[in-house]
Each structure stands twice: as structure tokens, then as C-alpha cells.
Amino acid sequence: MDLTAELKLPAPEGGDFAACIERASIIVFTIRLWCDPSVTMPVFADRSFGVLASMEANDRARVAPLEASPRFFALEPVNREGMAAKLAWVQANWTKAEALYRQSQEFRIAADALSAGQFVRNDALALISLWGALEALFSPSTTELKFRVSALMAAYLEAPGRCRLAKQKEIAALYDKRSAAAHGKPRHSSDDLLNTFNLTRSVLLRMIRDEAVPSKQKLEELLFGCP
């Protein structure tokens, strides 16, 4: 595997490399979210790769493989142009994503599901994982899941009107594919999985923009058009 870029973070206090890797993972997640979903973080090292290449045989360095699995459902960017401007957005917003990742278990699950989904061998499991994350965000109740989740999500993503109604129907149709996969009778296509990735992406981007995960009260206010 060829390395095409290096992400350099300050050395962690007390040698806490796990925290350093988690921060790097959050930055890479934000790059995937906004710039290029095909970006991976295949290896971690405790020094620059340029230094590693010139080290003496008796020198010691910490090097660990990270995302070394193949992408079974490979997502690609729609357009690679303007990448510098896209990376500027990442620079301005990754700390917001990090704060949400550390503060909200639901956001963390959704972010991890989105990042890991491409590496899941079984696309039905990837679909179930993404919808499990969306349910955690938009389903405070275990009853009437399909309507509740689709209605609250549509209210979160669209203003009142026909666009919101169309979005609710679109999400409900995707939820049916999730239910079939969860019960061992998958009826989804690759487009259904791709649309679920895009739906999860839209939700996470809205949360980063708002710097908040919506509460049950906020979602209900949006659903019923409260100011």
C-alpha cells in the first residue's frame, strides 16, 4: 500500500498514543465526511515516515497497522476538484466534530458506523449498522419505529412542506430495506446502501454545523413546526 499523505499530530502527553490515534481518526473521519470518503488511515507511527525510511537498523520506532482491510463497499468522491477549499472546511470544523464525538455516544456510534461501513464484508450488516446508529439518534421510543424515525429525521433535514414529506417517504422506504436485512431476508440494492450512507452523512454534517446533537424536545419542535 502506497502512502500519499502524512498527518502529523503533537506528541501526546505521558505517551498516550491511544488518545493520539483517536484524534487522528476523528480528523480522518471529517475528511471522509466532507472531502473524500475513500481516504484511509492504514498505519500509525510515533515519528515521521520520512525519518523511518532513514533510521538505522538498531533504532526502535512504534509502528502499528490501522485500517488495513479492503473496502468491500467502496465510496468515492463525486468531484475531486477544489480539494484545497474542502480541506479548509475540515480545518475549520474538525474540532466541532471531535467535541460531539466525545460528548455524545449517539454521535460517536453514527460516526464510527459511517467510517467502518465500507470495510464490512456483508453489505446487509453494513446497512443494519448504519440504521442502528440512525435509530439511536432519532428514536427516543421503541414504538412505531419506522414512522417515528423517518418523520423526525425528515423534520431535522428539511423545512416544512412537500420536500419534507418527500424526504419522509424516501427515508421510510430505506427503513423497509433495513428491516428486511435485519430479519434475514434482505431486499436492498447497492443503491439502497449508498443512499443510507448519504443520509447518515447529511445528518452528521447538520450536527457539526449546529455543533449539537438534537434533543428529543428539539426534534418534536421541528416535527410540529414550533419556532
Image (tube, rainbow, N blue to C red):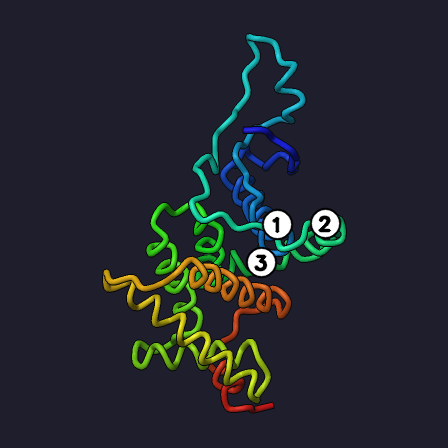
- Mark 1 element type: loop
Q: Secondary structure at mark 3?
A: helix
**Three-letter code, disc 2:** Met
Q: Mark 3 to mark 2: distance in Å?
A: 24 Å
Label 2 environment density (alpha carbons within 10 Å; few <14, some 14–19, many ≥20): few
Q: Which mark is residue 83?
A: 2
Discs 3/2, front:
2
Q: Position of residue 4 (x, y in %)?
A: 64, 33
Q: Amino acid at mark 1?
A: Asp
Q: Quadrant of residue 41?
A: top right
Which residue is under mark 1? 36
Q: Is residue 92 left or right of residue 165?
A: right
Query: Residue 79, how many percent across, how many down?
Result: 67, 53
Q: CA distance from mark 1 to mark 2?
A: 9 Å
Q: Residue at x 57, y 89 (%)?
A: 161
In screen coordinates, is 58 left or right of 142? right
Query: Which of these two is toward me, 209 or 190?
Result: 190
Mark 1 and mark 2 in contact? Answer it, CB < 8 Å. Answer: yes
Question: Which amino acid is tagged 3?
Answer: Ala
Residue 161 lies, with reference to residue 128, above or below; the image says: below
Is 197 left, or right, of 210 in this rendering? left
Q: Residue at x 59, y 37 (%)?
A: 13
Q: Residue 104 at x, y = what percent?
A: 48, 62
Q: Residue at x 59, y 58 (%)?
A: 97
Q: Between marks 1 and 3, how big is the CA–CA gap?
A: 22 Å
Foreground of the two, 4 or 27: 4
Q: Quadrant of residue 34 in the image?
A: bottom right
Q: Position of residue 126 (x, y in %)?
A: 38, 55
**Image quarter of the C terminus:** bottom right
Q: Circle 3 sits on which residue?
A: 99
